[in-house]
Amino acid sequence: MVLRNFFVKLFSWEYWPFGIIQLPILFLWMWYALKERSLFYFSASNPSILTGGMMGESKFDVLELVPEEVKPKTLLVKVPTNIQGVLKIIENNNLSLPLIFKPDMGERGWMVRKIKSTDDIEKYLSEIKIDFIIQRLVDLPLEFGVYYLRFPSQQNGFVNSITMKEFLFVEGDGKKNIQALIFEKDRARLQWGILQKIYQNRLAEILPKGEKLELVSIGNHCLGTTFLNANHLVSPKLSESFDRISKKIKGFYFGRYDLRCATLQDLENGNIQIVELNGCGAEPAHIYHPGASLWKGISDLIVHWKNLYQISKENHRLGVPYLSFEEGRAIYNRVKNLKMS
């Protein structure tokens, strides 16, 4: 299985390490940094978000900027805490299980969990070492990552990337058990280390023909979610809807909304629930569509960084300062220390 997984990753660049894909962008970042005489020029892209959203920002603080009508109730929990404290917070805010728990600072799905029971809470508290978020579960069928940008010199912004997320699942044939179904699906097999623990009591169960089992309910690529290029959904109406929402967010020009909605029409009309707002450090995730061209992905990333540079430069000309080297280094070291804790 190890050898088979190796070749799956080798020939499907969507699974390659983050640093390899971003390597060509490193040179572009250095060139822009030289032009602006600032390693952290991107910090001016979103003046209301720490570092523009590249690193060190609080997810809770960023989500607080989002209008109430388009986001679920979200609470910040400071550590250390205990299960009694967490249960009291949940009760006092009229929430109930299941809920989503996730670290206030983190990336690529790290420690994002669907919490269904007090046992799940106890397990989460035994693992989490930093402040975390409790969020109402948004039980809507469609999940998207929508990238929005607005140049400060222009009145209106627009959407230039939409990623539809398909959660990891297997489908029964009435013959194979869940373990066999996982092993025969590349994307699921790559998550075996996690799935064997989650489904340890169900691996021998045979799924009826046609029945689908959602294996992971968190929409992150690192957890097996399929990212589908949905750029065909970009329309003037959709851009207008996200422009309306974005202009209500002070100091926001460039970033990705991770959201859920009921229908495609709701998406276009902005009838959405934003579960996370990511600043300039977020990628246009449509590039990871299975089988997509690596060169097209890199080309899209180059355009992405050009837009980031232009927005940052325009904001700087309007008086937004770039983060100093000392400030940037301090934030980087703080993030690094948190990851090591």
Image (cartoon, grey):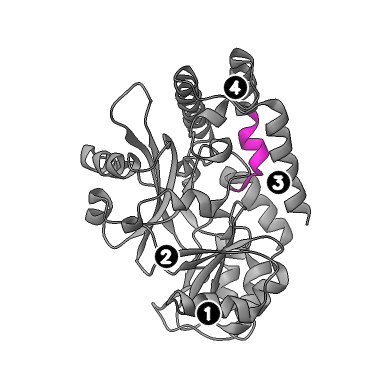
Q: Position of residue 40 (x, y in %)?
A: 62, 27
Q: Which residue is mark 2?
A: 73
> Could you tell me which secondary element the residue under label 4 belongs to?
helix
Using the image as rendered, state which of residue 268 and residue 170 is in the foreground: 268
- Residue type, numbered disc 4: Leu
Q: Earlier in the sequence, mark 3 or mark 2?
A: 2
Q: Which residue is mark 4?
A: 28
Residues shaded magenta: 15-23
Using the image as rendered, state which of residue 331 and residue 299 is in the foreground: 331
Q: Tell me what residue is drawn at x 62 percent, y 72 percent.
A: 195
Q: Is 143 drawn above or below residue 170 in the view shown?
A: above
Disc 4 crowd rating (10 Å Cα; few below 14, some 14-19, many 20+) is some
Magenta span contains residue 143: no
Q: Which residue is mark 3?
A: 335
> Could you tell me which secondary element the residue under label 1 belongs to?
loop
Q: Is residue 332 left or right of residue 210?
A: right
Q: Which residue is mark 1?
A: 116
Q: Are marks 4 and 1 in contact (CB under 8 Å)?
A: no
Real-space CA distance between mark 3 and mark 1, rounded to the nearest whole angstrom: 29 Å
